[in-house]
Image (cartoon, helix red, strand yellow):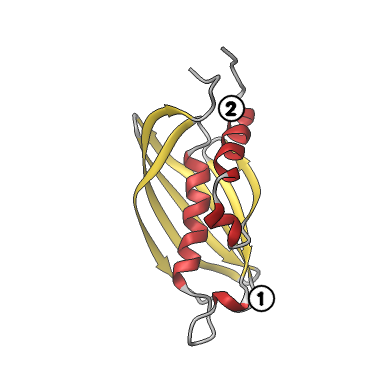
Amino acid sequence: MVTLDPAELARRSAEVMWSADTASTSLGMIIDNLGPGRATVSMTVRPDMVNGWDLCHGGLIASLADSAFALACNTHGTVTVASGFAIEFLEPAHLGDVLTADAREVILRGRSGVYDVTVSTATGVIAEFRGRSRSLNRPILEEQP
């Protein structure tokens, strides 16, 4: 059995998860930063991401936040899924904006966790997301106990 330090475990767990995440990668999401209980992901608003009012579709902002949340809650090496989330939209995003979702662990108890994600553009915060996670008690990496 191999024991990894927390930063390496976070990096390797993210690699496994992200390599199969075609939803996030097809939207052009990029992992900018990663560590135990945290992740930062960015995405540029493309023409196919705006709604009828020429604003970034809220579902895509939620998807970005959800992807950062997913990465953050899987950094401990255990397969973890969302049990729910809520998002508050504060400002719109526009074509060409680079959106950044910064996820951080608030609390992890047993198999349940709570994570906050702040979504920003260059001009400030546009959304706040709170996700609830549930561990499936399966290791992400084969060498994890």
Query: Within 10 Å of the Cα at label 1, are there few (<14), some (14-19), or many (20+) other Cα atoms?
Result: few
Does residue 131 appear to the left or right of 104 in the view shown?
A: left
Query: Within 10 Å of the Cα at label 2, are there few (<14), some (14-19), or many (20+) other Cα atoms?
Result: some
Q: Position of residue 34 (x, y in %)?
A: 62, 42
| Closer to us: 108 or 133 | 133
Residue 4, quarter of picture: top right
Q: Look at label 1 and name its amino acid.
A: Gly
The residue pinned by badge 2 equals 6
Q: Which of marks 2 and 1 is in front?
A: 1
Q: Position of residue 92 (x, y in %)?
A: 51, 77
Residue 44, quarter of picture: bottom right
Residue drawn at x 49%, y 57% is: 65
Q: Position of residue 113 (x, y in %)?
A: 38, 39
Q: In this view, does 65 lie above or below 12?
A: below
Q: Is mark 1 on a helix, strand or loop?
A: loop
Q: Position of residue 70 (x, y in %)?
A: 48, 46
Which label is found at residue 37?
A: none
Residue drawn at x 39%, y 43% is: 81
Residue drawn at x 53%, y 51% is: 68
The residue pinned by badge 1 equals 96
Q: Look at label 2 and name its amino acid.
A: Pro
Q: Distance between the residues labelled 2 and 1?
A: 35 Å
Residue drawn at x 45%, y 71% is: 58
